[in-house]
Image: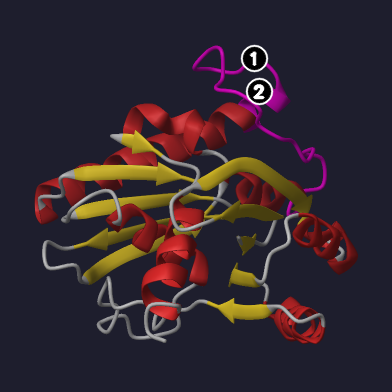
Amino acid sequence: MVAGLDIGNSTVSLKFFDQKTIFNEKKVWQTHLFELESLKKEIQLKKCEVVIVSSVVRELNTHLKTCLTRLGYKVYFVDQSSSSFIDFSDYESYMGPDRVSEVIGARTIHEGPFCVVGMGTAITFSVIGQNDTYIGGFIMPGVKTMLKSLSSNTSILPELEIHQKPESFLGLNTKDNIKNGIFYLIFHGIKGILEEIKSSYKVKNIIGTGGFSHFFKNLFDFVDKDLIFKGLKHMYFFDIRGSK
């Protein structure tokens, strides 16, 4: 049994898998409340020997690896060199492990060209060509990031959350004006970008993933919230273990 750990800026998610199956059970913590002791209890219950990690919170990584290694676990952190499945060599800087894992996960199901849209703290677009090469993408602020930014940079606007698609297009109060404005800014921003990607790069499929992807599901051909774990599973069994 392998523990897959997705450490994001907002949440930490844990799932378990073997070579055949990603199990449905999922544990989620708020990143700022995440405690290593809670993780240890979860993986001990499942009698795991291996933990494979996608982490965008670098300050957690050294402590996490040190503690788990001392307990006898094999710990692997993924990056864009972790798999030969996709060629990331044209990317000129460090790519977030979440994006790497999402793309690898998508490629286990879909052939290129395709685009993965990750909807978390940031909204990311990753376009993969027909020859399994990363050919470019975008990063833009996510839903919660926009809401928080608007509140923190103004004196009277409240910090809000969006839990569902707006019931009407126009808002009739300040809260709905904010929610609707951000929702439709993101909706039409994603829609416009994807139209250009489809036209210019002839992608076959658009795959949405991440916590807010279900709000925008009409923009995607597929929504798959397990893409990161599918990527972690592939990288462990086919790249890490397979290379030994």
Q: Residue at x 50, y 43 (%)?
A: 225
Would residue 173 be seen by someone viewing this image from the given angle? yes
Report the span colored magenta. 152-178
Taking 93 as reference, is 132 left or right?
left
Q: Are marks 1 and 2 in contact (CB under 8 Å)?
A: yes
Image coords of residue 241 (percent x, y): 45, 78
- Residue that numbered label 2 is attached to: 176
Image quadrant assignment for residue 166: top right
The verdict on residue 62 being magenta is no
Question: x, y (%) of residue 100?
Answer: 42, 68
Residue 183 vs 240, above or below: the answer is above
Disc 1 to disc 2, how far (Cα)? 7 Å
At label 2, the amino acid type is: Asp
Can residue 55 be seen by looking at this rendering?
no
User: Dot 1 corresponds to which residue?
Assistant: 172
Q: Residue 67, relative to residue 54: is it above or below?
A: below
Question: Which residue: 11% across, 61% down?
Answer: 130
The chief SS type of the magenta part is: loop
